[in-house]
Image: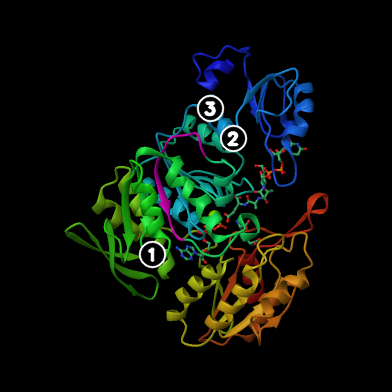
Amino acid sequence: MRLAALLDDADWAGPNPVVTGLAIDHRKVAPGTLFGAFVGERFNGEDFIPDAVAAGAVAVVARPDAKVDGAVHVADANPRRAFAHIAARFFHRFPATCVAVTGTNGKTSTVEMTRQLWRMAGFNAASIGTLGITTSVDSASTGLTTPDIVTFLSNMSGLAVEGVTHAAFEASSHGLDQYRTEGLPVKAAAFTNLSHDHLDYHGTMEAYLAAKMRLFREVVQPGGAAIVWADDAHSAAVIEAARARDVRVLTVGQAGEALRLVSRTPTQLGQLLVIAAGDVTHKVTLPLIGAYQAANALVAAGLVIATGGDVALTLANLARLQPVRGRLERAAIARSGAPIYVDYAHTPDAIEAALDALRPHATGRLILVFGAGGDRDQAKRPEMGRVAAAKADLLIITDDNPRGEDPAVIRDAIAAAAPGAQVIGDRRAAIAAAIAAARADDIICIAGKGHEQGQIVGRGDDMRVIPFDDVSVAREEAA
Ligand SMILES: CC(=O)N[C@H]1[C@@H](OP(=O)(O)OP(=O)(O)OC[C@H]2O[C@@H](n3ccc(=O)[nH]c3=O)[C@H](O)[C@@H]2O)O[C@H](CO)[C@@H](O)[C@@H]1O[C@H](C)C(=O)N[C@@H](C)C(=O)N[C@H](CCC(=O)O)C(=O)O
Ligand SMILES: Nc1ncnc2c1ncn2[C@@H]1O[C@H](COP(=O)(O)OP(=O)(O)OP(=O)(O)O)[C@@H](O)[C@H]1O
Ligand SMILES: N[C@H](CCC[C@H](N)C(=O)O)C(=O)O
Ligand SMILES: [Mg+2]
């Protein structure tokens, strides 16, 4: 495509080269590439402009004062945003219905449930997020929750070419802040909740919320919809942001208006939900336990309904939802008879939600194995220790992706707020100790890694991923 077409600028008077590809990393530049040079956390992409031009870049999107010689300078004060819109014109073909989910917890679960509900309604649907790219026939891992903008849009375009018409994706706060998931038309956006995480990156809760609010203030298309979990302390701010634009608001939850959760009664294998939609009350047996899974299921139903789904059919289909990998997944039963659950809780709020979900099912003790990631928010560690100590009966603190940090320092930071907790760094040994301690009426919860397949140790060039899967290890140690 010609550069002028990508810029959508009929008056473009500059040189008009043919652009054959896009890159934001100079090592991926080939002749004909349009290069995006961004100031990042570790590098200034503008430093690589000469290398990109030497490798054949024909145009560079960069700030107005960046130095570009030998290629067209597409100057923009916000080069990440400009690049996202150019990239969207380059890839141009996307699933007709794209929706996004943001929130501290519940994004992966919600996009996956949305995909399943669309599939049950007969659509060719996909989800993109922490679990990678999932369709009804395939799944592929991408490494990050929100991959970079080129990978994201090329994947979305690839899905459309394969015939996918409906796609739900996770919009992480990092991704929103870095314009990694936009350019394509987003028909509906959902908010699950906001609580403590990622303050290492955002600095304050206000900045963290502001990053998430971009989804409602800027990304969701005019005339689109916002599905807001109504029972969160930050819901009102999201509703206000959406209403300030031409975006229809559907609230869901106990305080919800579009889908009101009238009651929730735990059953042995799931829960009975009574949901009021307008004047009609629906009863659904959700085959998943815990208030948090009911919340995500309602937000997913809201997204499907907002994009044209039939209310009664969508709510009835909740009864057929399959569990999401690593989210309260029952991995094994210990020889004592205690069930072992694996959950991806890696924030204070998520630990609380996971333990609250399991509590009604335990007549004995709740035993929790958990840790916190290295090179991530340090302030959340004592909070995780505190809530774990308040909600579980026996705690074993262990390692969860120490990355470039000393794992003992991370464990100590959690343990300082959880007096009485055992500390066993080796994760397999910690899981084995929990299983050994469990009695028949106890429940074991192994938190933090969910679907993850490895322990990340080291940073930069020294980074290694040691294969580790909580579900398999639980099965092995329980056998
Ligand atoms: C803090 C953070 O989010 N960093 C991400 C971000 O990096 P950055 O823009 O700051 O990049 P940088 O490394 O400083 O480099 C600046 C620019 O120079 C370019 N560059 C750099 C080096 C070079 O040799 N040549 C070159 O051209 C880079 O491509 C980049 O455009 O953009 C990169 C490319 O898109 C990401 O790989 C990188 O993710 C790092 C690896 C990461 O760990 N991110 C995590 C924290 C993250 O994003 N997590 C969220 C999940 C959160 C959740 O779900 O709760 C996610 O969405 O996955
Ligand atoms: N609606 C919710 N409210 C509170 N906690 C939740 C909710 N949904 C999920 N959780 C907790 O958060 C964990 C992660 O859930 P999920 O993977 O769906 O979230 P996410 O937002 O995609 O996380 P990430 O930030 O890693 O991408 C779950 O295992 C559970 O412990
Ligand atoms: N998307 C989250 C995942 C955290 C998972 C946990 N196992 C950890 O490593 O902290 C993050 O990158 O912060
Ligand atoms: Mg996720």
Residue 443 is a magenta residue: no
Quadrant of picture, ligand 4: bottom right
Tell me the quarter of the image containing the N terminus. Answer: top right
Q: Which residue sits at x=46%, y=87%? A: 363
Q: Secondary structure at mark 1?
A: helix
Kind of residue sitting beneath label 2: Asn
Residue at image mark 2:
78
- The image quadrant of residue 403 is bottom right
Give the camera-side residue of 398 and 43: 43
Q: Is residue 300 above or below residue 414?
A: above
Q: Is residue 381 above or below residue 309?
A: below
Residue 170 vs residue 97: left or right? right
Whether residue 339 is visible here, answered yes or no, is yes
Residue 190 is a magenta residue: yes
Q: Which residue sits at x=74%, y=20%? A: 56
Kind of residue sitting beneath label 1: Ala
Which stretch appears magenta?
Answer: 182-193
Q: Looking at the picture, how far across and down is residue 234, in whole percent?
A: 43, 61
Q: Residues within 10 Å of mark 1 (few under 14, many from 20)?
A: many
Mark 1 vs 2, N-terminal side: 2
- The image quadrant of residue 262 is bottom left
Mark 2 vs 3, N-terminal side: 2
Tell me the quarter of the image containing the C terminus. Answer: bottom right
Q: Residues within 10 Å of mark 2 (few under 14, many from 20)?
A: some
Residue at image mark 3:
91
Q: Are marks 2 and 3 in contact (CB under 8 Å)?
A: no
